Amino acid sequence: MIYLAIPPGWTLHPGGPHIALPLLKGYLEGRDVEVTVRDLNIETANYFKAQIEENDVVNAIANQSIDALNSVYFGSEDRLAAVAKQFGGKWFAHEGYQHLECDLGNPESVRDVSLYRSPFTEYFNNEVIPTILRANPKIVGLSIYVPSQVLTAFEFSRLLRSHGYDGFIVFGGNHITRIAQDMRLDWVFDIIDGIVTYQGEKTLYDLHSTLSRSGDLAAVPNLIWRKDGYIIENERALLKVPEFARPNFDGIQADSYWGTKYLPMIGARGCFYGKCSFCAIPYGWGPKNYIGRSQGAEVVSWMNDAFEHQGTNRFKFVDEALHPRMLREMVAAKSEFSTDFQFEGYVRFDTNWTDVKFLNSCGDIGLRKAYLGLELAPSENRVVLAKADHADPLVVLKKMKDAGIKTHIFCLFGYPGTGVDEAIRTAEFAFNNADLIDTLDIFPFYYARHTNVQGVKVVDEPSRPWRTEHKYAPDAENVLWPEEVEVLAGRMNDIAWQERPYWSHPIYRMFSPWHDTDSIQFENWKLVPGKRKTAALPA
């Protein structure tokens, strides 16, 4: 048996689980390996009675005031903040728990603070670890997507060991893949037994088989482990398309998530384009950012299976970009749908989305909302982003609205080679076309690991090898300093909040993809001084 868990620290905004554990469970149980899955992130929030039901969201929207939305959202988040304060930490619903003394980029800081009591200690000891000890799985795997989960993962692993568990503890996930080479530390392997990079399906299956026969771990792919005092990295083996498994959502407490409930779905593993100069998100799938996609008819069969077993017809596709060819294949398979589906997903500004017939067919199969990476309004300097998307954004937005598909726009300000002018032009584009935009995010440029950005130089931080974003300084003319980028994005966010507060409000975002918004009188929404939130949905 394998026991897989998501440690606390991930965002609480999604209406469903992360895709990782359902994919792992689907692969492993398809090969007769029993798997138990638990989302300790949402479980611990619920433990502290921080939960937002769909009715709460619907009623707040019906009130048509920011005050009503804030009351629902901060009613839950303030509970978490009060709990965290008792342990010297902070806990925002979108960002996860963080201890104020812990530098998550510094391994020694994580090591030391993981010894402290936290909001999760009691829950781990009383509600989770006893179930693991009774089941006595060969492997306990923790799936880690963001830095704030690392601290809680180490605390959990320490506590599990202190209760006598002597099985194999392994860390994996996108974030772990990105910092794996810097985790080859003896103290890490004093607590856990292994690190999995990239996809964990083959690794966990081979690891389980090898442990069952007391074999040699050297043949287990994608595994970093310790033998005779030496930390070893095994050969890499990425999944091939025929090995992609149907997500298995059994054991997921789907009704425990916030807002309108849905399930994650996936068509492609990684980004089929994968060349945007600022983006490291798809690196977790493989060094080339993409390992392939499933056929649209197969994806439809997975959606049917989820509907039949879980009863939901709503899905969030987590592909970095929905492949137009896969969507056309889904259109061709519409007669196989078990019900009328609704889904949302990320797309590129390419010319497929100017094709009215294609847009209407996507709407017919249930596409309710598209998340588009505009980053910057068209200009000569936008080319530095290396997006190679050639559609006119305004044409895409207009045609999507005509097709009944809502849109979310991502903006990125301060990328080297761009500056204040581009940010202002992009903000003006958004405000001038606000009737075409459902929600919007403004992010400052961060220099992500595993990207190569011209015009800046990395500032070495030898004590922070677990950072996922480089500290940097300008290395060319007309490049903004990081502090200037933060101010620029912050001011633009302030303006957007004042002009269009619903664009960034988490409660509205929990509502809009799945419900009719035509009757909402946005001009009547009044701002409440004080608290505010800008909240991107996770990728």
Image (spheres, rainbow, N blue to C red):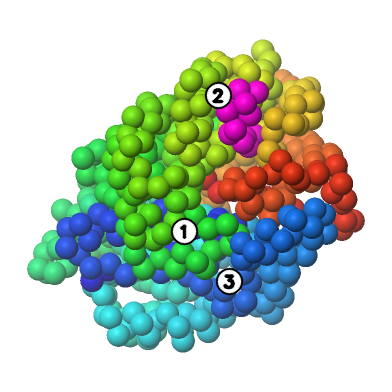
Q: Position of residue 126 (x, y in %)?
A: 46, 86
Residue type, numbered disc 3? Ala
Question: At 32% from the left edge and 53% from the top edge, which residue is drawn?
Answer: 305
- Sequence order check, earlier mark of 3 and 2: 3
Marks 1 and 3 close (CB-CB < 8 Å)? no
**Mark 2 residue crowding within 10 angstroms, few (<14) / some (14–19) / many (20+):** many
Residue type, numbered disc 2? Phe
Q: Which residues are magenta?
A: 398-409
Q: Is residue 27 left or right of residue 507?
A: left
Distance between the alpha carbons at the discs numbered 1 and 3: 14 Å
Nearer the observer, 430 or 310: 310
State yes or no: residue 403 in magenta: yes
Tell me the residue that label 2 is attached to: 349
Q: Is residue 441 left or right of residue 532?
A: left
**Mark 3 residue crowding within 10 angstroms, few (<14) / some (14–19) / many (20+):** many
Farthest residue, direction top: 380
Q: Dot 2: what SS?
A: loop
Tell me the residue that label 3 is attached to: 45
Distance between the alpha carbons at the discs numbered 3 and 2: 37 Å
**Mark 1 residue crowding within 10 angstroms, few (<14) / some (14–19) / many (20+):** many
Tell me the residue that label 1 is attached to: 17
